[in-house]
Image (tube, helix red, strand yellow):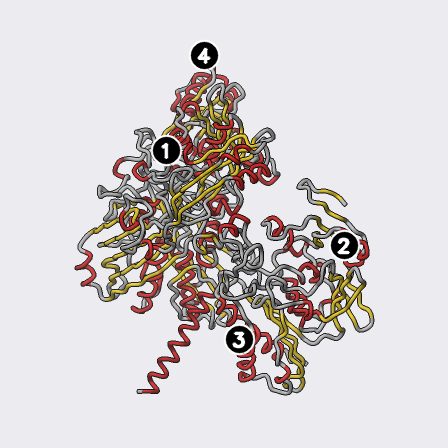
């Protein structure tokens, strides 16, 4: 560990608006399409009209001859794959030889205006010899199915088989063993800003400037270098303001590479602004998932064993698939004490847009199935849902069976908070007809402890600068995509230096000036970048303290810095210096100061030794629990969420206002997946590719959300903090489904619980009741 | 006539007469109300007018006037003003329908005439040019197959307007302006059970007003959809019921979202004189299920739309009867 743990019980919670909030609400903030593109060419992408096939002929000559067309690129212009894991990059920015989903890029045009670009696309001639296409996992896995990728038998991208402990014996010792198969529809991030990037290539200096909606500019840097065969030092990446990510922009996206290729081919500047439909087609979100989970339980609720099979329909290319299928198994652990476990995961290829990372990456659908089954078994055993969870709490510090490190654990307090606030004990079982309460728990990592690209460098580096103006500038490669990470960095620096927040300026995600960072994924920024920021600020503080000590003729260890004043501890007015005088003193002889802070995870935090054991490992888990109150209309199948009580253990709330916002956002996004969001395809064409058909909840559906912040003070977190943006998401859907069961006595095995699904379940129950009656009548 | 940056010409008439003339002078043009339906369809290239006749400056179409035993609603009245107008309050179904249309932004822009004349909808039709082209287009636009019912000869796109059923239960008439003069007909005759040509208007005709009879019976409107805003109805039902001494006087039920046109449920006369009890409600349920024809034009199943339409009809009839709808 490079930074000393900081646990300061006196540290007050701050509630500050995001430092870039004013820019956003006044419209000053410049998002990618707002950047100056007056002299830019317009980029457009030709997309495959078929789901699966071999490209027999591709002729761009007519398009190239059109006046106003400056550049055209095809798969021939980029023979390099791109992707996430070095071992699983099987995707070209534009198809080469074969297309595997409707919407896959085939060629692209840069022209003087949009009309010309559109006309050029229409002039491209393409002939595709169709191959059989598969849209559900079962079809793709059939023995006679055509392979999407020749080296992937059975159309399986990755199988995972993990066993921990003698689960068979443990099942035999259980008093109750139950199994459920639960299905979760594919969903999408639906971030409000459609994809866009602006690429500028200077043929004289052979340099590329890329401004894009990236969550991880470092990955973009690597992949542009790889796919354009350019030296990394000739590429500069800047992230402008970004309107949401949720995982959509963690991996490098095809349009970014295509735009860079176009800019180089055109020897100029190209703006690529995708439509909402294209943004949906780019996808990389949560896969359709079938979870078959079995639990063995003692009469008192103690879990003896769990077995779980997960099948994810991953789409046409690898993307993050291997990581997602590993997360789905590894994060069965870390929330409760599960003494034996078997996990079988299958990531399946299908002729649909590739899936990827999405908020709660890999964990959400497994957690949903597990929490639903837990409730059903509790009911069967006559146990309260809270009690069954309390019977399985962890006792940290510990390492789970699969090697996950748990040091702080606020779940018990989360349970207490929502149980009391919702009036659970008084109300459960006494709700009027059609109304119900349900609850569930969840957790998430505070940053993946092992980065995907192992370089030996620290996980995070933050530079802090001081110059003659007395301003403190924090430089970080971490991408603020709306989650407030730059504000977190500013607070960490200001808090450590004892200066006011508005003295700190944060410059983020510009590869020419900010240190490399692994970016905005796996909720890593607060924990890792926060610690690095504190480390840098402490180094700056040492320099300032020494300068103040020299001026005040005191020992550095006697200097304290509070409220922008450095003073000798216990001294009077004359033994103190305002910040700007200390800064001036520090600059004497050496000039502008830049210090560098780092954060690195220790090896013991990096997961088990088994294959794939690093996925799921983290320095600390956030813990969440929520109660959902619903009304179900049994005539129309419509479900209304009346209220939500949610508690999240985020270690320490560095900015309580932002933490509350993130928790509400998690609940809300969980609600979307649980109630209405769903991507559906008609023979591989998206039926959902607009914000009308992709049903993100509106303010009408948004219930009152009562948020409780629980602080377990993680020993290694920055000020004791852990992540706050993902942990509360996964408990919404199971809490809702459990509440519906409580309201109408029906266990739903599919999400989202759209009115037609609820109605179908009601119809099925009536039919079964009639059958049961007629059987009785006949016997 | 002005020209937009896109090259599209827009006429801005100030009277109905000018509007009709402008439309006649520009074959291939379309009337533009609030644009909440037309502009979206133009962006998707499923509607490709060569000019627009903007009706927003035709003041005579933007009034609600009570005259004698008729309440005349101009087709240019916005949905938001309609919902808030005191003279509409007695027509409860209309208020409820108007309040539930799309979202607040849409209601501020969209008009009564535009809502009544909105295009029919289908998951194979309301898609981008790339999408429809990849699917060989469809019977409604540029293609020759209805993907919803490939064996059939007609387009099944569903009518999804909320106002039409809510108005239909009051037996209104509409005024239509045309190059050849004005005509008047029952609102019910505006609609045709054909997703490709669901309006009986002829070239150049414009719906200018809806005429509601005074002294409306008690009424209500309800619909089902996945979200409580924005979404079009999967099924919408309006009911008007008079009763005396616990017996049905007259009962009218109109539906939307289930067929290519909004329609009045046939055969409700037979309920006159009956008590509103479970048996009656069950009969209404069956009658609705028999007459609606939802097809796979939405991602929700057609059976759901059938069952939900019937459930809403039962509920509204029971509600109105319970309110002592006398």
Please provide percent x and percent y for residue B230: 58, 57
Q: Is residue A421 left or right of residue B87?
A: left
Image location (x, y in percent) of residue A725: 43, 45
Q: Position of residue A65 (x, y in %)?
A: 54, 32
Mark 2 touches mark 1? (CB < 8 Å): no
Asked whether A230 or A25 is in front, the reply is: A230
Q: Please identify, in this view, whether the residue under mark 4 or under mark 2 is nearer the observer.
A: 2
Tell me the mark number nearer the camera, choosing from 4 and 1. 1
Kindly identify which numbered label has been placed on residue A80.
Answer: 1
First in sequence, mark 3 or 2: give its number: 2
3D distance between C-alphas at marks 2 and 1: 58 Å
User: Relative to residue A269, is residue A732 drawn left or right?
Assistant: left
Q: Chain of mark 1?
A: A
Q: Crowdedness of circle 1 by 10 Å Cα count: few (<14), some, many (20+)?
A: some
Q: Which residue is mark 2?
A: B24
Q: Is residue A662 above or below residue A569?
A: below
Residue at horizontal 31 percent and vertical 30 percent from the top: A455
The mark nearer the N terminus, 4 or 1, is 1
- Depth check, front residue: A551 or A141: A141
Residue A259 or A702: which is nearer the viewer?
A259
Q: Residue at (49%, 26%) from the top-left corner?
A: A201
Can I make out residue B203 in this image? yes
Q: Quadrant of the C terminus of chain A?
A: bottom left
Quadrant containing the N terminus of chain A is top left
Q: Which residue is mark 4?
A: A589
Nearer to us in this view, B197 or A209: B197
On the same chain, marks 3 and 2? The answer is yes
- Residue that label 3 marks: B289
User: Could you give the CA–CA distance between mark 4 and mark 1, rounded to whole angstroms?
Assistant: 51 Å
Per the image, label 4 sits on a secondary structure element best described as loop
Q: Secondary structure at mark 3?
A: helix
- Residue A737 is situated, as x and y percent measured from the top left of the image, at 41, 62
């Amino acid at each position: 560990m490079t930074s000393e743990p900081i646990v300061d019980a006196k540290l007050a919670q701050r509630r500050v608006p995001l430092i870039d909030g004013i820019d956003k609400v006044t419209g000053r903030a410049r998002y990618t399409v707002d950047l100056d593109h007056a002299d830019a060419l317009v980029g457009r992408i030709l997309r495959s009209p078929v789901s699966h096939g071999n490209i027999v002929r591709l002729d761009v000559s007519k398009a190239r001859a059109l006046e106003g067309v400056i550049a055209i690129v095809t798969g021939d212009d980029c023979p390099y794959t791109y992707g996430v894991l070095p071992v699983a990059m099987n995707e070209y920015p534009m198809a080469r030889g074969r297309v595997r989903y409707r919407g896959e890029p085939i060629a692209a045009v840069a022209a003087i205006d949009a009309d010309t670009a559109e006309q050029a696309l229409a002039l491209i001639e393409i002939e595709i010899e169709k191959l059989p296409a598969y849209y559900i996992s079962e079809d793709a896995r059939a023995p006679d199915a055509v392979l999407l990728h020749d080296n992937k038998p059975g159309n399986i991208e990755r199988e995972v088989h993990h066993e921990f402990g003698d689960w068979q014996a443990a099942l035999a010792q259980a008093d109750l063993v139950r199994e459920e198969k639960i299905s979760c529809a594919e969903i999408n991030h639906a971030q409000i800003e459609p994809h866009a990037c602006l690429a500028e290539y200077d043929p004289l200096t052979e340099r590329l400037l890329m401004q894009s909606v990236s969550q991880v500019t470092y990955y973009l840097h690597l992949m542009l270098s790889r796919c354009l065969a350019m030296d990394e030092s000739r590429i500069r990446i800047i992230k402008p303001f970004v309107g949401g990510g949720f995982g959509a922009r963690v991996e490098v996206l095809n349009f970014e590479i295509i735009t860079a290729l176009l800019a180089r081919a055109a020897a100029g500047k190209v703006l690529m602004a995708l439509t909402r439909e294209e943004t949906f087609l780019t996808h990389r979100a949560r896969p359709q998932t079938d979870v078959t989970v079995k639990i063995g339980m003692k009469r008192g609720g103690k879990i003896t064993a769990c077995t779980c099979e997960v099948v994810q329909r991953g789409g046409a290319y690898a993307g993050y698939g291997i990581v997602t299928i590993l997360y789905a198994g590894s994060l069965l652990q870390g929330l409760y004490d599960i003494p034996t476990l078997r996990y079988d995961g299958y990531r399946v290829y299908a002729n649909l847009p590739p899936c990827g990372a999405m908020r709660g990456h890999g964990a959400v659908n497994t957690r949903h199935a597990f929490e639903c089954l837990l409730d059903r078994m509790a009911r069967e055993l006559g146990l309260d849902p809270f009690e069954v969870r309390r019977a399985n709490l962890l006792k940290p510090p510990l390492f789970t069976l699969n090697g996950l490190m748990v040091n702080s654990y606020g779940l018990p307090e989360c349970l207490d908070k929502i149980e009391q606030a919702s009036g659970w004990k008084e109300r459960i079982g006494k709700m009027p007809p059609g109304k119900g309460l349900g609850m569930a728990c969840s957790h998430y990592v505070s940053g993946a402890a092992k980065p995907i690209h192992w370089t030996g460098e620290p996980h995070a580096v933050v530079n802090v600068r001081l110059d003659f103006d007395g301003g403190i500038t924090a430089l970080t490669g971490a991408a603020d995509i709306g989650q407030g990470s730059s504000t977190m960095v500013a607070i960490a620096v200001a808090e450590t230096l004892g200066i006011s927040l508005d003295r700190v300026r944060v410059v983020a995600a510009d590869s020419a000036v900010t240190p490399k960072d692994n970016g905005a994924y796996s909720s890593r920024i607060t924990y890792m970048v926060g610690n690095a920021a504190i480390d840098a600020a402490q180094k700056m503080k040492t320099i300032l303290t020494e300068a103040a000590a020299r001026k005040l003729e005191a020992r550095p260890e006697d200097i304290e810095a509070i409220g922008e004043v450095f003073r000798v501890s216990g001294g009077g007015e004359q033994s103190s210096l305002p910040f700007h005088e200390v800064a001036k003193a520090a600059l004497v002889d050496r000039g502008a100061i830049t210090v560098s802070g780092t954060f690195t995870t220790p090896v013991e935090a990096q997961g088990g030794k088994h294959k794939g054991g690093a996925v799921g490992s983290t320095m600390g888990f956030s813990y969440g629990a929520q109660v959902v109150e619903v009304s179900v209309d049994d005539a129309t199948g419509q479900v209304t969420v009346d209220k939500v009580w949610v508690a999240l253990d985020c270690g320490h709330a560095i900015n309580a206002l932002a933490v509350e916002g993130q928790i509400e956002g998690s609940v809300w996004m969980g609600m979307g997946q649980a109630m209405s969001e769903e991507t559906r395809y008609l023979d591989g064409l998206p039926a959902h590719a607009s914000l009308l058909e992709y049903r993100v909840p509106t303010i009408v559906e948004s219930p009152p959300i009562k948020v409780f912040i629980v602080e377990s003070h993680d020993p290694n977190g920055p000020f004791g903090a852990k992540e706050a943006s993902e942990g509360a998401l996964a408990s919404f859907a199971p809490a809702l489904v459990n509440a519906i069961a409580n309201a109408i006595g029906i266990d739903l095995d599919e999400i989202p619980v759209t009115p037609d699904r609820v109605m179908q379940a009601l119809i099925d129950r009536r039919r079964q009741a009639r059958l049961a009656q007629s059987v009785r009548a006949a016997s | 006539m002005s020209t937009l940056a896109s090259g599209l010409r827009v006429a801005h008439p100030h009277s109905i007469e000018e509007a009709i003339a402008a439309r006649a002078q520009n074959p291939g043009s379309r009337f533009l109300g609030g644009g909440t339906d037309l502009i979206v369809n133009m962006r998707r290239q499923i509607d490709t007018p060569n000019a627009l006749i903007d009706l927003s400056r035709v003041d005579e179409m933007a009034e609600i006037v009570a005259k004698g035993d008729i309440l005349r609603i101009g087709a240019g009245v916005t949905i938001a003003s309609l919902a808030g107008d005191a003279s509409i309050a007695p027509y409860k179904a209309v208020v409820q329908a108007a309040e539930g249309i799309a979202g607040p932004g849409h209601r501020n822009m969209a008009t009564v005439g535009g809502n009544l004349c909105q295009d029919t909808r289908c998951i194979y039709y309301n898609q981008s040019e790339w999408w429809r082209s990849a699917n060989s287009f469809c019977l409604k636009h540029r293609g020759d197959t209805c993907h919803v019912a490939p064996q059939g000869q007609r387009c099944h796109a569903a009518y999804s307007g909320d106002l039409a059923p809510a108005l239909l239960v009051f037996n209104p008439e509409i005024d239509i302006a045309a190059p050849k003069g004005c005509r008047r007909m029952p609102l019910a005759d505006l609609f045709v059970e054909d997703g490709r040509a669901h309006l009986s208007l002829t070239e150049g005709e414009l719906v200018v007003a809806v005429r509601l009879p005074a002294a409306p019976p008690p009424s209500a409107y309800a619909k089902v959809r996945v979200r409580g805003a924005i979404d079009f109805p999967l099924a919408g039902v309006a009911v008007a019921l008079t009763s005396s001494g616990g017996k049905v006087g007259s009962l009218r039920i109109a539906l939307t979202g289930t067929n290519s046109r909004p329609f009045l449920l046939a055969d409700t006369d037979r309920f006159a004189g009956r008590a509103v009890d479970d048996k009656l409600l069950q009969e209404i349920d069956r009658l609705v299920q028999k007459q609606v024809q939802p097809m796979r034009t939405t991602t929700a199943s057609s059976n759901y739309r059938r069952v939900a339409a019937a459930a809403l009809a039962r509920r509204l009839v029971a509600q109105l009867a319970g309110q002592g709808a006398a």
